[in-house]
Amino acid sequence: QVQLVESGGGLVQAGGSLRLSCAASGSIFSINDMGWYRQAPGKQRELVAVITSGGSTNYADSVKGRFTISRDNAKNTMYLQMNSLKPEDTAVYYCNAHYSDYLFRSWGQGTQVTVSS
């Protein structure tokens, strides 16, 4: 199994920056891709960004050019650098990992990001 723990959320003004971290433990050698999702009140959970084991990345159109996803394999940690934050970025952000050849999926507990206007 893979366990994920997010950190780094908080309250920031529009235009500001935050960096989220996701620490992985357990069967980390079996992790395939990892990603960040978010869920705003009354809305469905949506993909924000994903990074493969080879380092390829993909982003939602709404965050392209503002957010950067990265992985530090030595620290078993994934990051989401969020710049130029907007009020519409307010949501609970969840870390996600597919592992064991995409047979399984793990979620973190979520971290709240609130952007004030």
Image (spheres, rainbow, N blue to C red):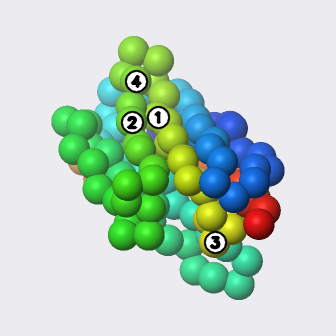
Query: Is residue 61 or residue 52 the one in the foreground?
Result: 61
Closer to the N terminus: mark 2 or mark 1? 2
Closer to the N terminus: mark 1 or mark 3? 1
Name the residue that disc number 2 marks.
70
Q: How dense is the environment of label 3, judged by Cα within 10 Å: few (below 14), some, or many (20 and up)?
A: few
Q: Secondary structure at mark 1?
A: strand
Q: Identify whether 83 is placed above or below 77.
A: below
| Disc number lying in front (2 or 1) | 2
Q: In the image as oriented, which residue stretches furthest toward the top?
A: 74
Asked if marks 2 and 1 touch (Cβ < 8 Å), the reply is: yes
Task: Answer left or right for 92 relative to 96.
Answer: right
| Disc number lying in front (1 or 3) | 3
Name the residue that disc number 3 marks.
88
- Does residue 91 show up? no
Asked if marks 2 and 4 touch (Cβ < 8 Å), the reply is: yes
User: Considering the image in quadrants, where does the C terminus appear?
Assistant: bottom right
Residue at position x 38%, y 55% from top?
65
Closer to the N terminus: mark 1 or mark 4? 4
Task: Answer left or right for 14 relative to 23.
Answer: right
Query: Is residue 53 or residue 56 the one in the foreground?
Result: 56
| Disc number lying in front (4 or 3) | 3
Q: Secondary structure at mark 4?
A: strand
Name the residue that disc number 1 marks.
78
User: Hey, what amino acid is under mark 1?
Assistant: Met
Task: Answer left or right for 80 relative to 7.
Answer: left
Name the residue that disc number 4 marks.
72
Asked if marks 1 and 4 touch (Cβ < 8 Å), the reply is: yes
Residue at position x 66%, y 48% from top?
16
